[in-house]
Image: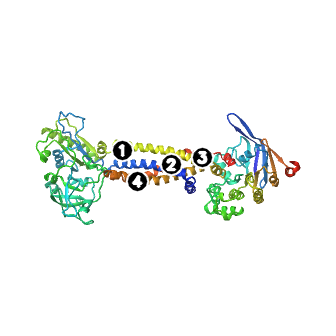
Amino acid sequence: MLKMQNLSKVYRTHMIETQALRGFDIHVREGEFVAVTGPSGSGKTTFLNIAGLLEEFSSGEYLIDNVNVAGMDDNARSRLRNEKIGFIFQGFNLIPDLNLFDNVDVPLRYRGFNSAERRRRIEQALTQVGLASRQRHYPAELSGGQQQRVAIARALAGSPKLLLADEPTGNLDSNMARGVMELLEEINAAGTTILMVTHDPELAARAQRNVHIIDGQVSDLEHETRRALASLSTTPEAV
Amino acid sequence: MFRYYLSLGFRSLRRNPILTTLMVLTLSVGVAASITTLTILHAMSGNPIPHKSERLLVPLLDNLPADNGNDDGEPPEQLTFMDAINLWEQKGAFRQTPLYGLGPAIDSGRDDLPPFFTEGVAIGRDFFAMFEAPFLYGDSWSSEDDSRGAKVVVISRSLAEKLFDRGSNPVGKKVRISDNDFSIVGVLDKWDPVPKVYRLIGGERFDTSEDVFVPIRTAVALEFDRNGSMDCSSDPPGPGFQGYLKSECNWLQYWAELDSASSRLAYADYLLAYVSEQKALGRFARPVNNRLFNVREWLDSRGVVDDDTRTSTWLSFAFLLVCLVNTVGLLLAKFSARPGEIGVRRALGATRADVFRQYLTEAAVIGVVGALIGLLLTWSALAYIRSLDDSLALVTRLDGTMLVIAVVVSIAASLLAGLLPTWRACQVVPALQLKSQ
């Protein structure tokens, strides 16, 4: 589903050059649920932005759903992003003066679906996240957890193959976080590939695979190791 | 997608009401100022009879004395009675008419309507056909009426409605004009050529057309005083009205209609021959200095649109430019407050072009609202100008053309003002905005 080989990303200013990713290799298969962890500044967000075609990379190769994205212009990248990728952000990023229906409608508009198709998809997505009855409400009228569910509905409405989640529970309390995580697991179970950046070892442990990024490079951890790391981080002795 | 952008544009008006109000007001005041002055300029610089512009001519003949002191090289702007009547009788053109202004008194004979003065012109019967004056009832008087100076009159619709029952046909009835009974032969429908091209000298150029039209021979026979300007280079040979008829005083305007524009040269030759003939009779002491003006040339030469009007139009458009610059600033403020939304839309599949179209449509929506309020302000400003000066009533009408221009100017201005803010909005880097939300 997603394959990066020897990818690098360099940020340059007139004073300084920062290597955010170097020799970055990753292969995420269709249907996987991959948690991306790593310390702050390790390159997780850069990786997610490049994966989501929001940023360009400096060198290397990136294939998404077997499509090589190198050299694509803005229109092609936007179209690919719209058709294949869904985003979930830590800050929800709903548009405040659009109601839930219209928020979920945004990516569908750019997709060019007709009115009936858009309505069907919006209602289906909002039903899936349990907010069908509140489609005329505005984001400010919802709790954080509900807003994140709307963001998930928005990401799902276009039936993306890949869901990119950047700290999706970072702004939620544990109850709400659990609910969102369960929803993501359901979505993954239905076949959508998920790449989730998180700082939370507990959440990372629930993913099928954990990719650890350190200094802009991938360190793929085995499932058991992750479980061990998770238990270490939650036992008092380990602190 | 345009409808989607349009709905987002209207929705966005509510987003920041104070900023939106400021933008709309700035734009509408600029539009109102420019469209108000443009409306006046447009009306003043109009040609009321464009399809005949090349065929309707004003001849000027230079009858000034050889030793004329203030010689600017131009002939007088009107003709003498002798020349006007000579040219008229010789029928050197397809149609022709001399013309001088009158200020006749009308006596209705009714107790409820005391005698009153009004505006009139003394003309030849061709006048109506030449300027395509529309008849509501009746028609022009006959050639015979012209020749014998019959007491016949064509009156305006407004005078007819004032003197007789509204809707009734007064043709055949009598009306008392300056102590003489005239038989009404025709009633003109509402007719207000702007500018009043046939009488640019000695009359209000933008006033409504006259109420009374009488044959020139009749007016002269009854010694109806002229209501207009006169330029005498020497004293009249005799006293009173009769003296002016034989004088070298220039006080009549004259119009000739050619059968085609290509006959202009032939008509110029005819005038040359006429002046040569008059020279042989001892008149026209100076070298031949005839002039011919078609309608457009005549309007230009008379300076119908004064410099003040042109200057105020330029100034008002400069003011619109200032408003535009302010709108750019306000739009920048409005759009720059929304990088988060732009980032989200880009992440969800909007191309830069989509963002550009959305935000430019939003700017256009402000232009549409600005246009509507601007039109209201324009209408009020024109009404105010009318209330200050009645003679400007005809040039302070907001016609369909100006309505369209106002809307186009407003939307174009808002689109122009929206270009920079929209371009800036398109430069938002989504990755930066999404993380910082």
Closer mark to the observer between disc 3 and disc 4: 4
Q: CA distance from mark 2 to mark 1?
A: 26 Å
Task: Determine if marks 3 and 2 fall on one subunit.
Answer: yes
Q: Is residue B151 visible?
A: yes
Closer mark to the observer between disc 3 and disc 2: 3
Residue at (48, 50) in percent of width and height: B25
In the picture, the disc for residue B287 is: none
**Location of the N terminus of chain B (image quadrant):** bottom right
Mark 2 element type: helix
Give the residue at mark 3.
B336
Q: In this orientation, which residue lies closer to the viewer: A235 or B402?
A: A235
Q: Amino acid at mark 4?
A: Ser
Give the residue at mark 2.
B414
Classify A165 as above or below B173: above
- N-terminal of the two: label 3 or label 4? 3
Task: Determine if marks 2 and 1 fall on one subunit.
Answer: yes
The total of numbered circles placed on residues is 4
Classify A113 as above or below B359: below
